[in-house]
């Protein structure tokens, strides 16, 4: 560590709770550094609990209550089934993160304008009373629907998680909850309407070893699942084991999942994958291959390939006594069938045929390469297709994902070991008991993404207009605006939500949301918008029981975390915070805690975990008590997951959870929504948003800010591809200097574009559009497609004082969400945050 950074860190350690927001000031440097530790070194287990899908365990070394270093797991020899869960650079930097200068040290209340970041310290009692009293009065005046705990994925604890706030609300009448999530809302809808699944039921990654052709769209496990026991590791091992596997990767960026592991990289223009899929389908169908090879499979297992299959299903629904099925029958139209659409026949005779030449102009992928993919899919015995979530976080990503899923259907090879259907790989996990939240008496759910709109328009939002769920009918409004937001381990309050400048305006307006509570460990750009800040203990200061999260691959693990150091300053866990607030609400504290201490809760959850049949065979065996488990720390189990996508449907005849029970190329539910929901071209209440159409069969659409959007391409000629960077998990870890050095936050520019725009590596540019401006450094690299720039998401929003080219203050932090658009997608009402157009200017 540099001497200067060490001094800064030491200053932070001593930083008194009275310093407003603990901004650095000259006085900070004068506080006493911690006493140099002299005692014996202790080793305890903790874990990295960000949302990257792994929850890696880490070993924490401390002396006299001061963390001295953090190491990764290396307690077992790497074997075939049991191996080390090595943390990535982020997990290994946890000491710097724990002692960061911007740690929140005491509860605070806002004294300036919202967002200004001016706070004064208050006691926990005052914070709890203010929050509890306000929650109670809002519930009395507006009902429980006016309370919202926003999406927040910053701390995957089992016990002291942000679910504690849900427990608190549910004990007091509930709160407004949400459906979907920022990760894959649109692909969830795509998978539900195609396969009746949740979009993560693709074949297990290890089964890829049995495949002979891999086709990955936006699939990048090496950068987004970096754990030593994660999807990235499984992917690598499968590639090593596979015999003669051909790998085609489609991504605007040349990612770490390639680096020589691929046979072919095809850079594509963002948002155009559906056009590519349709051209591949065109080749497979027009060449007669489908008729000769997979038509039998398609006829048996799917609805919608041709008019006859739609008519047959319509007749079944028409004969039903189920009201919904009768409604389906009433809207189904067999003219809208996939084969006609792809070949340009029937009602599609005036539309272009979806030829490789047609797709080349849109996607930038040469027609000959598109034909080659069709040939590879045709000749493969077990084609493994996967669409990463990068294609779903786009304008009308629902259509893109559905279009990609079709390819697996056309091959007719689904159900074969080594094949997969385009969904993300299935992941098994061990069981871990977690804090019970009870049930939420409030039934209505908004989309996770529409909360910022529900602050002013919740009263009028409906199923038809905003996909609100569980209201009585299409036009019954939600009926309430959001008045209180509890944002816990969450930066979607600002930094991770779309259109930051607009969101900031909504949050600043105190007539809208009346109380914002932020529970975090650091003074983040989102926390600055709070009225009350609650400082949480960090992972290294916590006892908890955590699992291996949702993408840890073939081997699962549980970590019994033991705090290495006492909670610092005046920090309290989310459990303690919620319990204190409960005192000031109807339920009281006793109902919340059930009279149990933290240790008693952990013992109870541990015993539940220990008793679970899912965990049989864990290594080492679970000891008697939780306290003993903490001394062992890490427990592993190989899950033997060989899940093959759709095998139970294809091979065992089990019906799918779609309305027809089959694979729906033509979705009856989407035909119904197309007739009933607001969308572009809808008669009822058109949104008018370009490309936001719902159609019964998947179709490539020209969307707002897409490659073909002529309205914006003149002013904003560059497509900007956002991605999840190794330097952060979202906004988490942004404040760790080591990581800022290790992974440069620069925008990738192809050498062809460098010449075109006259920029060189190291130049600073303003990137802007109608929604905002960011300042960012340029890195010239052939690892990005020409015409496309690429920027890692999650950098912290930090407005300076300079006004940018479109009248917005330039965000010196370079947060990509200063440029994204708040425009809920047509079906999921999800976040199209990868659809961005910009212009640049050297600064
Ligand atoms: N290091 C790191 N790991 C993470 C996270 C993180 O922030 N940092 N976040 C975690 C979370 S919560 C999630 S949801 C996952 C996200 O995982 P993903 O959604 O898979 O991640 P992205 O980087 O958004 O997208 C993957 C790839 O899609 C490419 N891409 C973008 N647009 C397009 C397009 O239109 N077409 C094609 N073919 N490719 C495109 C990007 O260049 C990128 O390489 O990652 C998890 N893991
Ligand atoms: N433009 C764009 N925006 C995106 C995405 C994108 O691809 N592009 N990806 C989206 C996706 S997939 C996701 S999942 C979301 C993620 O968005 P978030 O769920 O907001 O994830 P993070 O940015 O990691 O923020 C987590 C917060 O938790 C805090 N935190 C960390 N540890 C603790 C703790 O122990 N206790 C408490 N109380 N707080 C803690 C962190 O400081 C941080 O403020 O972002 C979405 N936003
Ligand atoms: S960020 Fe993910 S891969 Fe890295 S240490 Fe944390 S949990 Fe493991
Ligand atoms: Mo995510």
Image (cartoon, helix red, strand yellow):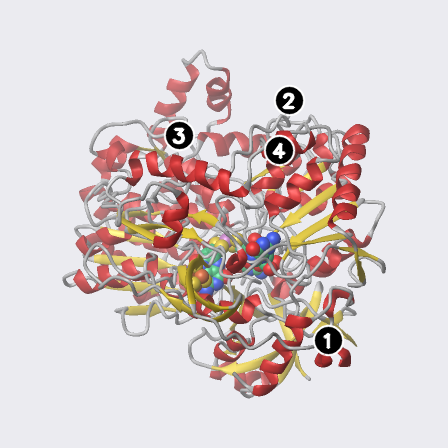
Left or right of 154: which side holds 502?
right
Residues packed near mark 4 inside 10 Å, few (<14), some (14 to 19) or many (20 plus): many
Q: Nearer the viewer, mark 4 or mark 3?
A: 4
Q: Give the mark nearest the N terminus, 1 or 3.
A: 1
Q: Where does label 2 land, which residue?
A: 472
Disc 4, disc 1: CB below 8 Å? no
Q: Up-down: is 417 above or below 800?
A: above
Q: At which x and y percent is residue 795? A: 60, 68
Q: Is mark 2 within 8 Å of ligand 2?
A: no
Q: Nearer the viewer, residue 263 or 738?
A: 738
Outermost residue to the left: 243
Q: Where does label 3 land, which residue?
A: 658
Q: At which x and y percent is residue 648? A: 25, 33
The answer to whether residue 344 is visible is no
Report the disc number at residue 391: none
Q: Secondary structure at mark 2?
A: loop
Q: Nearer the viewer, mark 1 or mark 2?
A: 1
Q: Nearer the viewer, residue 86 or 413?
A: 86
Distance from the alpha carbon under mark 4 to that under mark 1: 38 Å
Report the disc number at residue 24: 1
Distance from the alpha carbon under mark 4 to that under mark 3: 40 Å
Q: Give the mark nearest the N terminus, 2 or 3.
A: 2
The answer to whether residue 96 is visible is yes
* Residue in the image at 32% along x and 58% along y: 229
Left or right of 294: which side holds 7?
right
Q: Give the mark nearest the N terminus, 1 or 2.
A: 1
Q: Secondary structure at mark 4?
A: helix
């Amino acid at each position: 560590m540099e001497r200067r950074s060490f001094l800064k860190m030491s200053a932070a350690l001593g930083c008194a709770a009275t310093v407003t927001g603990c901004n650095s000031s000259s006085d900070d440097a004068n506080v006493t550094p911690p006493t140099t530790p002299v005692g014996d070194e202790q080793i305890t287990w903790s874990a990295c609990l960000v949302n990257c899908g792994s929850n890696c365990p880490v070993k924490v070394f401390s002396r006299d209550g001061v963390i001295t270093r953090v190491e990764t797991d290396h307690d077992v020899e790497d074997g075939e089934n049991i191996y080390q869960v090595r943390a990535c650079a982020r997990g290994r930097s946890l000491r710097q993160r724990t002692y960061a200068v911007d740690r929140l040290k005491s509860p605070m209340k806002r004294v300036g304008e919202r967002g200004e970041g001016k706070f004064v310290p208050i006691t926990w009692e005052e914070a709890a009373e203010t929050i509890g009293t306000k929650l109670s009065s809002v519930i009395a005046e507006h009902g429980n629907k006016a309370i919202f705990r926003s999406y927040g994925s910053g701390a995957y604890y089992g016990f002291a998680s942000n679910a504690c706030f849900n427990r608190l609300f549910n004990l007091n009448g509930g709160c407004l909850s949400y459906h979907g999530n920022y990760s894959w809302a649109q692909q969830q809808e795509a998978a539900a309407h195609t396969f009746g699944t949740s979009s993560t039921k693709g074949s297990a990654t290890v089964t890829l070893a049995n495949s002979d052709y891999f086709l990955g769209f936006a699939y990048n496990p090496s950068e987004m699942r970096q754990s030593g026991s994660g999807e990235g590791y499984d992917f690598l091992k499968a590639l090593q084991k596979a015999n003669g596997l051909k790998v085609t990767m489609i991504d605007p960026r040349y990612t770490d999942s390639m680096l020589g592991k691929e046979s072919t990289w095809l850079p594509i223009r963002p948002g155009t994958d559906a056009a590519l899929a349709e051209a591949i389908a065109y080749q497979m169908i027009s060449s007669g291959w489908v008729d000769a090879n997979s038509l039998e499979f398609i006829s048996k297992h799917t609805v919608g390939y041709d008019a006859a299959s739609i008519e047959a299903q319509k007749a079944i629904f028409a004969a039903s006594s189920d009201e919904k099925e009768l409604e389906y029958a009433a809207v189904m139209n067999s003219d809208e069938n996939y084969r006609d659409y792809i070949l340009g026949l029937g009602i599609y005779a005036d539309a272009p045929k979806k030829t490789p030449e047609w797709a080349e102009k849109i996607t930038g992928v040469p027609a000959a390469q598109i034909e080659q993919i069709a040939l590879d899919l045709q000749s493969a015995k077990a084609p493994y297709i996967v669409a990463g979530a990068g294609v779903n976080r786009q304008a009308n990503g629902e259509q893109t994902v559905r279009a990609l899923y079709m390819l697996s259907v056309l091959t007719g090879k689904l159900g074969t070991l080594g094949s997969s259907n385009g969904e993300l790989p299935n992941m098994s996990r061990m069981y871990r008991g977690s804090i019970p939240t009870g049930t939420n008496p409030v039934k209505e759910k908004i989309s996770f993404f529409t909360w910022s709109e529900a602050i002013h328009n919740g009263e009028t939002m409906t199923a038809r207009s905003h996909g609100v769920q569980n209201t009585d009918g299409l036009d019954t409004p939600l009926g309430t605006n959001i008045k209180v937001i509890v944002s816990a381990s969450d930066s979607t309050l600002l930094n991770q939500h779309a259109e930051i400048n607009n969101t900031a305006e909504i949050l600043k307006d105190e007539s809208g949301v009346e109380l914002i509570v932020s529970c975090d460990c650091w003074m983040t750009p989102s926390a600055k918008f709070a009225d009350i800040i609650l400082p949480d203990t960090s992972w290294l200061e916590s006892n908890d029981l955590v699992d291996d999260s949702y993408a840890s691959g073939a081997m699962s693990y549980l970590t019994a975390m033991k705090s290495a150091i006492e909670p610092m300053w005046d920090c309290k866990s989310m459990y303690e915070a919620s319990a204190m607030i409960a005192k000031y609400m109807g339920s009281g504290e006793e109902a919340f805690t059930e009279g149990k201490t933290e240790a008693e809760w952990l013992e109870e959850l541990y015993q539940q975990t220990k008793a679970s049949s899912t965990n049989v065979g864990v290594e080492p065996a679970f000891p008697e008590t939780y306290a003993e488990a903490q001394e062992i720390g890490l427990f592993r189990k190989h899950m033997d997951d060989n899940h093959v996508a759709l095998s139970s449907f294809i091979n065992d005849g089990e019906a799918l959870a779609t309305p027809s029970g089959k694979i729906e190329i033509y979705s009856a539910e989407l035909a119904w929504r197309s007739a009933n929901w607001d969308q572009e071209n809808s008669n009822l209440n058109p949104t008018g948003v370009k490309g936001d159409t719902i159609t019964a069969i998947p179709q490539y659409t020209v969307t707002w800010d897409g490659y073909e959007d002529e309205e914006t391409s003149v002013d904003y000629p560059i497509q900007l591809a956002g991605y999840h960077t190794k330097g952060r998990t979202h906004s988490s870890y942004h404040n760790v200097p080591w990581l800022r050095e290790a992974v440069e936050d620069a925008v990738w520019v192809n050498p062809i574009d460098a010449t075109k725009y006259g920029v060189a590596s190291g130049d600073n540019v303003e990137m802007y559009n109608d929604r905002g401006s960011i300042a960012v450094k340029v890195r010239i690299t052939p690892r990005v497609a020409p015409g496309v720039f690429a920027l890692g998401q999650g950098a912290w929003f930090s407005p300076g004082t300079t006004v940018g080219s479109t009248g917005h203050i330039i965000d010196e932090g370079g947060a990509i969400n200063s440029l994204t658009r708040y425009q809920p997608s047509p079906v999921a009402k999800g976040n199209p945050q990868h659809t961005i157009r910009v212009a640049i200017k050297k600064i």
